[in-house]
Image: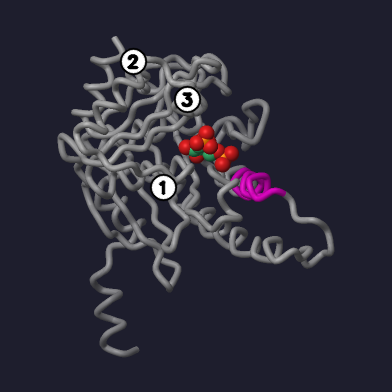
Amino acid sequence: MGEGISDYTKNIVDLRRHMWLEGVEVELRRLIWQIAIVGKYISAKIHESNRKLAGLKNVYGDDQLALDRVSDDIMRNKLQFSGFVREYASEELEDIVKIGTGKEKYIVTADPLDGSSLVDSNLAIGTIIGIHKDSVLDVGRKTMVAALYITYGPLITMIYSAGRGAHEFVLDREGEYVLSQENIRLKEKGSIFSPGGLRRDWMPEHLKFVEQLEKDGYKLRYSGGFVPDINQIIIKRGGVFTYPALKNSPQGKLRLLFELQPMAFIMEQAGGQATDGNEDILSIKVENINQLSPVYIGSSAEVQLAKQMLS
Ligand code: AFP
């Protein structure tokens, strides 16, 4: 082995080593590791979709299944035999499903492939995961023990938090998730904003909030993918994403259980905040798995401003 390679191997902190050093409980770290592996399989499926973009059929001659369905199958199969998961709730399924023997420690929520409609235009997409110790139809803050998201962009990156900060890893060419940023902390205030929904459908208070950001010189950054938009705020250390209440959809568009609460968990661990305008996202009781909520998530100054203007 060349000296360069062994030095590299010696110096990197991979995901498993990081979780061990952080003192993440053994079953939880094994589960997070297995989910990270699923991320590799999903990214392989995204790459295979180039055949569909090229107007081709898959190797079996069938039309390819929607990528989000395939991603869900992969996730569910992996978790089913992980030995750590007793219930699985997915954006792709109607109900929470029991998997495993029922004695396993964790319940997992998944948005296996968020933003899949962006695949054909080659924009970044992602996977969002929440890990709970008790029923998810409860208050998120009490039951969630960890959350992570994977961004499939020019690079594949993952940010996880098991309640001790938020840490970023990048998938290297050897297939290893290597630590790239530890204990990411947002600044009090950022300089970018990602506003979802059509301006003509916004409520007057929300319009005022956005106009204030525009007046303050915030730059518009909106891709149509929740994962890359949140990732940009975290990596740039500040800013705000919002998908507000709309005139014809008072609860907005995004799902509390699959999208908002896992991201709120990570955002809080990075020193940011998340609210529906009134209540913390993590304190909202989830009454059904498809529940939607308006959201303001990002660095604290902007989230506080939203709260003030909406109240
Ligand atoms: P798709 O999975 O249908 O692409 O939706 C993505 C998403 O749920 C979320 O990732 C985005 O932030 C949001 O919708 C974008 O919604 P708009 O298309 O209304 O801007």
Q: Position of residue 33 (x, y in %)?
A: 44, 52
Residue range highlighted in magenta: 66-76
Q: Tags 3 and 1 in contact by the CB under 8 Å rule?
A: no
Amino acid carrying mark 1 in the image: Pro
Q: Report the number of numbered marks.
A: 3
Q: Is residue 72 magenta?
A: yes
Does the beta carbon at disc 2 come under 8 Å from ligand 1? no
In the rendered view, does 164 fall on the left or right side of 99?
left
Q: Nearer the viewer, mark 1 or mark 2?
A: 2
Q: Which residue is mark 1?
A: 228
Q: Is residue 164 left or right of residue 187?
A: right
Residue drawn at the location 22% of the way across and 22% of the way down: 304
Image depth: mark 3 or mark 1 in front: 1
Q: Residue furthest right?
A: 61
Query: Looking at this rendering, what residue extends furthest in the bottom direction?
Result: 2
Q: Amino acid at mark 2?
A: Glu
Residue 113 image point, x, y percent: 56, 45
Q: Marks 2/3: CA distance? A: 22 Å
Is 143 or 53 nearer to us in this picture? 53
Q: Which residue is mark 2?
A: 205
Label 1 CA crowd tier, 10 Å (few <14, some 14–19, many 20+): many
Q: Is residue 50 above or below residue 187?
A: below
Indicate the secondary structure of the residue bearing disc 3.
helix
Instruction: Read off the residue under disc 3.
Output: 256
Residue 121 belongs to the span the image colors magenta:
no
Distance (Cα) linking label 1 and label 2? 26 Å
